[in-house]
Image: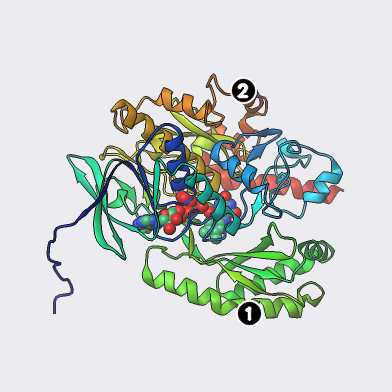
Amino acid sequence: MANTYIEEARELPIYADCDLLVVGAGSAGSAAAVAAARAGCKNIILMERYGYMGGDVTGGYVIMMPNLSWYNKLYIRGIQEEWFTRLSKIPGAVTAPTEDEIGSTDPAKVHRWRSFIDCVSRGTFEGCKESQLVRAPYFEPNELKIILDEMVYELRDRITVMYHTMGARPIVEDNVIKGVIFESKEGRKLIRAKFVIDATGDGDIFSQAGAPYSGLSELGTRSIGTALVWRAGGVNWSKWYEWQQAHPELIPEIRKAITEIQGFSGLFVPSNNPNIVWFNNNHNPMDCTKIEDQTRTEIETRLSIHKVLDYLKEVCPYVWADSYLYDIAPQLGTRCSKRLKGEYVMTANDFAFAKKHDDVIAWHSTICQINDCGPVEIPYRAILAQKVDNLLAPGRHLSTDNVAIDWLNLIPQCTGTGQAAGVAAAVAIADGAGAHTVDIRKVQDILAGEQNVPLPRNSHTDPSYTELAEEKQYGLYTAAAKLAKETGDALAHRQDGQRERKAELEAQQAQH
Ligand SMILES: Cc1cc2nc3c(=O)[nH]c(=O)nc-3n(C[C@H](O)[C@H](O)[C@H](O)COP(=O)(O)OP(=O)(O)OC[C@H]3O[C@@H](n4cnc5c(N)ncnc54)[C@H](O)[C@@H]3O)c2cc1C
């Protein structure tokens, strides 16, 4: 018996023609559509397989974002900060140190935020021995769904949203993308477009368009895996934090027991609601594009939930006695999938040597230990597909190696590269240029000017951003960075640097 079937060719209806088609409305795709519309693009379609925007952030319940600031500066602004400006008007929707507070070392403030992971600097390296406040917002994902609808709906004369439509196949002619075939309850149809942004996170479009990419089998990264996040109610996070502080010796044992009960690693952290705890997990390695792995993740997570809560009630009834399952994220999450091999591939060297790029489109701070979470330059070429024109790929499938992806798949990087992709598409379409020939200076000026994205070496950006980065050596005072500088290789010494610094800290603690 043959194990393949040749499907009959058929004519497809053209559903619509547009200037810009954005496939996937996660943090990258929704930002791309909004940014393009604000930059003047008039006929945009935003296609999304589910019935809401946000992807991992809203549907996957990834409800915190580290390091929007570094020292006393908010390096991440633009659409990313706009989410929180809007959310802050809704009671209880967002919790974070404010812009006025970042960089503060006031002991009372540091104490107030200490229990929120990443709201206080990690303090691992010389540069931040004194703990300081960081803008790391915790937010309610369902409120964010409403905000994202609102931002796009305000631009409805320019953006048409198509929920419940799945991009299935790109149309490419003479190495230029011309549109995407999609599936929906209306059947299989085609949208023709002058320019396409693949923001599916999984490279659904570029992987079929002839653009080089890395498959999951060659990734070998910590980020490979799936997750199904859930939340527990009836637990006061401050009470748990105090209990943890009083019983530090029990915490590794509890973590180990939870991993054994679940059969996969997990971590619980606070949320924007003081009485709701966020259960993050990582089924690793799992392939988020495989039906079998997706199904196992769903079932095995759900079957573990009550076992975990029962264990916590038993081991620490003082905090967990009244806990209950509050909700389960409506969609499976993933940190990494197929990745673009774009015109530039970002690596740990971008972090270890503070690489500067003429085509910088976002200046992002991360949780990278090599450069003490310092801001890093992301070039336009990291979202620019090779071999196919008019196709950009912002978000967690951008072009990085299998180490840098661990730092570059964070939400701010996805929103920031999405915003830049939208502006680049708008400029290219208006000027009759392609993705490879777009006037990048014009793109940078729009981003740094009217779109409020700080960019290095751009006249619209307050020079104090660069001055601070220079004054603080771009975070390259860490042991790992020093080793990398001596040898010219960031990767070989990342672990050594961390080990060396850990030993140093332990020795200091032993002395006290
Ligand atoms: C469990 C977990 C914890 C994490 N923790 C953090 C954290 O604490 N902080 C942080 O900053 N980051 C964290 N991350 C990473 C971060 O959430 C993601 O990398 C980021 O949100 C990805 O954004 P994106 O827009 O690139 O992709 P996605 O959010 O995946 O968006 C892709 C969108 O495209 C849609 N789509 C996909 N395929 C198609 C198709 N063929 N047709 C139409 N639509 C399609 C999807 O439905 C989705 O809406 C975490 C991730 C996970 C899974």
Type of amino acid at the residue the image marks with label 2:
Asp
Q: Is residue 27 left or right of residue 48?
A: right
As drawn, 275 above or below 307: above
Residue count near mark 2 (Cα–Cα under 10 Å), binned few <14, some 14–19, many ≥20: some
Asked which secondary structure carries label 2, the reply is loop
Asked which secondary structure carries label 1, the reply is helix
Q: Is residue 256 visible?
A: yes
As drawn, 464 above or below 264: above
Instruction: Indicate the quadrant containing the N terminus: top left, top right, bottom left or bottom right.
Output: bottom left
Q: Residue at x 13, y 61 (%)?
A: 10
In the displayed image of the protein, which residue is found farthest to the top?
Answer: 459
Q: Earlier in the sequence, mark 2 or mark 1?
A: 1
Residue position marked by numbered label 2 in the rendering = 462
Residue position marked by numbered label 1 in the rendering = 306
Q: Is mark 1 within 8 Å of ligand 1?
A: no
Q: Position of residue 210 (x, y in %)?
A: 24, 47
* Residue closer to the observer: 410 or 421: 421
* Residue closer to the observer: 465 or 172: 172
